Image (cartoon, rainbow, N blue to C red):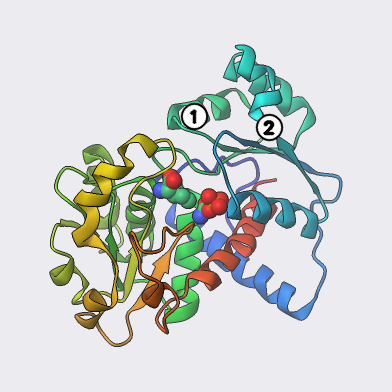
Amino acid sequence: MAVQMKGKDILSIHELTREEVRQILETARILKMKNLTGELFQPLKGKTLGMIFQKASTRTRISFEVAMWQLGGYALFLNPADLQLKRGESIADTARVLSRYLDALMIRTHAHEDVSELALHSNVPVINGLTDRFHPCQALTDLFTIAEKKGSLAGLNLVYIGDGNNMAHSLMYGGARVGMNVTICCPPGYCPDEEITKQATADAVATGASIAIEHEPARAVEKADIIYTDVWTSMGREEEHAERLKIFAPYQLNSALLKGAREDALVMHCLPAHRGEEITDEVIDGRRSIVFDQAENRLHLQKAILALVI
Ligand code: CP
Ligand code: NVA
């Protein structure tokens, strides 16, 4: 049975039920099929999405913009440098005012608390387009892509190698909701947030999944169905780049590491990739890589979210 998601904020996968996650993935599947057959589906005629980006973006911005267009609506890019937010207007007042014009808001920013604050004072659904803690639209897309490639999700082993960052957090929450085992293989000192790890581990009980932290890439990839990586230096941490290059070097996803993985293990990356750092050309362009299908699926998955919440 369909669950009602109209008006729902999409802030983190932890705040979505299993049924809601299932519905988003199923809707994405249907909408992708409509795209492939060229069938028009425009339930959002006359609806407008506002998009605030406080950090750079290629995929999120363009896929949301195209998603609204394809659904019959309109997307408005809001440059924070041009908003009164920049001159001290509060997030709460911004939310109250924008809710009077828009049908949904998407925001990419630094502090997750700012997105929660925006959602608290907004009368329209707020979608998290990435914060320092979470990237739910990407992780939901990743679940959709894995299901597409592997046929199912429950019982699979996803091994994420690299920084215990926003992607690691969202993949743990996502895996927990769908019964997929998630291992984060990171350098000591760069583990995912403890509280989030505890919550994801608790969420995983309901679906029989497991959440694990590892530090040995060669051991971690042995049983992986999916090997996932992300940049070592996330947006906003650029000053740590040189130090991170040294610390993360043993965690590079390269051909030598893949030799120890199963023949059918797939490689994923949310992109943008820093080729030669966290992943080599050989691997990202290799036969196991599904990163560009993954990038395409942002469009289909976000269309599902927009159609469900607006
Ligand atoms: N993966 C992702 O969110 O890409 P962008 O930073 O280009 O939006
Ligand atoms: N962890 C990365 C993800 C980019 C899509 C960052 O926050 O920069």
Indicate the position of residue 189 as horizontal and vertical percent values: 16, 42
Residue matched to label 2: 79
- Residue situated in front as seen by the camera: 282 or 222: 282
- Is 42 placed above or below 110 here? below
Position of the N terminus by quadrant:
bottom right
Are there few (<14), some (14-19), or many (20+) residues within 10 Å of tag 1? some
Query: Is 212 situated left or right of 157 in this image?
Result: left
Q: Amino acid at mark 1?
A: Ser
Identity of the residue drawn at 46% across and 59% down: 270
Farthest front residue? 242
Residue 272: mark in rendering: none
Q: Secondary structure at mark 2?
A: loop
Indicate the position of residue 142 as horizontal and vertical percent values: 46, 64
Residue matched to label 1: 116
Q: How many marks?
A: 2
- Is 253 placed above or below 90 here? below
Whole-Å distance between the Cαs marked 1 and 2?
20 Å
Farthest top residue? 88
Indicate the position of residue 91 as horizontal and vertical percent values: 58, 20
